[in-house]
Image (cartoon, helix red, strand yellow):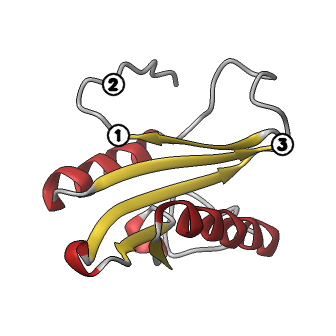
Amino acid sequence: MTNNYPYRPLYETAKDLKHEKEIAKKIEEALSWRLHKLSKAYFLDFIAFSKYPKTMGLVAFIEVKKRNNHTNKYPTVILSLNKYLKGVFYAKTLGVKFLFVVQFHDGCFAYIYAEDADFEYKA
């Protein structure tokens, strides 16, 4: 696939977008949020807004992945450093949450960014 970014091709397929929509629907139902797909310029998949009148407004930026295995198959889940840093930037700058949501065969799991998180970085 081609894109406007000269150094890295985009690998997102129609099937990936279908899976993203399915995962987004689960998030909306579980958290009573409305999700909107972001353009590639934001580097993340979705922005979320609260449905409740008292807390209406922006609540989170979300990156989603679908993995075709069970959670116990591999000891890690990979998220690009660029996406992680963008999510952290948006969370800190706008005072909202950053979620990394992964759908596995045995469930849908979310990591919510926290300042004191301990990660392993590898090249």
Q: Residue at x 85, y 36 (%)?
A: 69
Query: Which quarter of the picture shows residue 90?
Result: bottom left
**Mark 2 residue type:** Ala
Which circle marks residue 113 in the picture?
1
Which circle marks residue 105 in the picture?
3
- Marks 2 and 1: CB-CB under 8 Å? yes
- Nearer the observer: mark 3 or 2; the answer is 3
- 114 lies above or below 26: above
In-image side of 52 versus 62 (left or right):
left
CA separation, marks 3 and 2?
Answer: 26 Å
Q: Position of residue 33 (x, y in %)?
A: 44, 71
Looking at the picture, tell me which residue is in the foreground, 79 or 105: 105
- Bin the neighbour count of mark 1 within 10 Å (Cα to Cα): few under 14, some 14-19, many 20 and up: some
Q: Residue at x 48, y 75 (%)?
A: 35
Which secondary structure lies at badge 1? loop
CA separation, marks 2 and 1?
Answer: 7 Å
